[in-house]
Amino acid sequence: MTVRELTEQAGFRVLSMPDGEREIEGVYAGDLLSWVMGRASEGQAFVTIMTNINVLAVASLLDLSCVILSEDAEAPSEIIVSAEEKGINLLKTELPTYETCLLLGSLL
Amino acid sequence: MPKVTAVNNEILYYRFDVDGDNFTSAGEASVQTKRILRRVGFPPEAIKRVSIAMYEGEINMVIHASGGVAELYIEEDRVVIVLTDHGPGIENVELAMQEGYSTAPDNIRSLGFGAGMGLPNMKRYTDGMEIETKVGEGTKITMTVNV
Ligand SMILES: Nc1ncnc2c1ncn2[C@@H]1O[C@H](COP(=O)(O)OP(=O)(O)OP(=O)(O)O)[C@@H](O)[C@H]1O
Ligand SMILES: [Mg+2]
């Protein structure tokens, strides 16, 4: 499934989608960035409540397919601009992390 | 921008100053490194390993040592990263290398750091890693990634 398709079916809000045709290859959830850096793998959707610039660094270095901010986590506008610049798909949902992952599990 | 010097025909050398004051913008050296290695035409897998190692090392210098210098040597079949800081040094390297060990303060943890996974990641993603450190003087970490 592509990031665009997932966004539509899950009803996620789009903060930035420079690469909507990107294929999603699994999911990883976590908030401790170095932990995620060591465990997540290329193409995964990354579910987190962290909204600082380092989340984008992780997404970009691991070449993740998208970042999904759960729990209605508020993203500062400079993060959204930076995601667009770096070519990172950034989505948002009011669902808690567990429910977000359940939904992803049922759709993917 | 990094300074670039051709040491000889074989080796490309870059030097990055890592600013200790601003860890929300930290990661600049790894972004630049990724760009440089792409231009050189290295395989994506090697680029990824080098830039992750650089990122974790860079963040550590910002968080734990108020900044430092990152140097990058690009050779034909390997990349060497040298990170040098004049921070507090690491008292027990063996302990610091363990997954989960972290001395990161709460304000840093609230940004998603402090899992105690940075040094283990650096070791995992590289082919060689050496730590020279002295309490009160600083830390020098040398990492090698074979291409
Ligand atoms: N350059 C450094 N100078 C001084 N101490 C360091 C340095 N790098 C690491 N350390 C020490 O080693 C510990 C472990 O480092 P490591 O990168 O594994 O974890 P962390 O930085 O605390 O958290 P994480 O990397 O998961 O966000 C640090 O908490 C710190 O005490
Ligand atoms: Mg670290």
Image: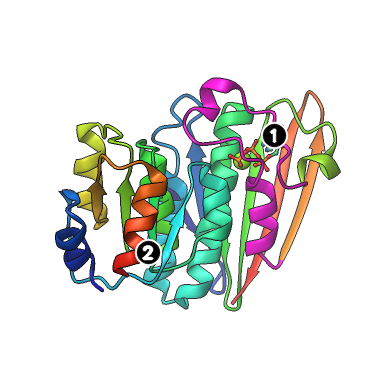
Identify the mark at residue A108; answer none if there is no mark: none
Q: Position of residue B89 (x, y in %)?
A: 76, 31
Residues at discs 1 and 2 both on one chain: no
User: Closest to the observer: A56 or B50?
Assistant: A56
- Indicate the secondary structure of the residue bearing disc 1: loop
Please, what is the dominant secondary structure of the magenta stretch?
loop
Q: Which residues are magenta?
A: B98-127
Residue at 19 percent across and 59 percent down: it is A7
Report the mark closest to the observer, 1 or 2.
2
Nearest the eye: B134 or A92? A92
Please give the residue where the numbered disc 1 appears in the rendered image.
B102
Number of on-image labels = 2
**Does residue B105 appear left or right of residue A104 in this picture?**
right
Q: Residue at coordinates 24% horizontally, 58% vertically from top-left?
A: A87
How busy is the neighbourhood of tag 2: few (under 14 within 10 Å), some, or many (20 plus)?
few
Q: Which residue corresponds to mark 2? A: A105
Dividing the image into four quarters, tell me where ligand 2 lies. Answer: top right
- Residue contact at pointers 1 and 2, CB within 8 angstroms: no
Q: Look at the image and say whether residue B42 sits in the magenta stretch.
A: no
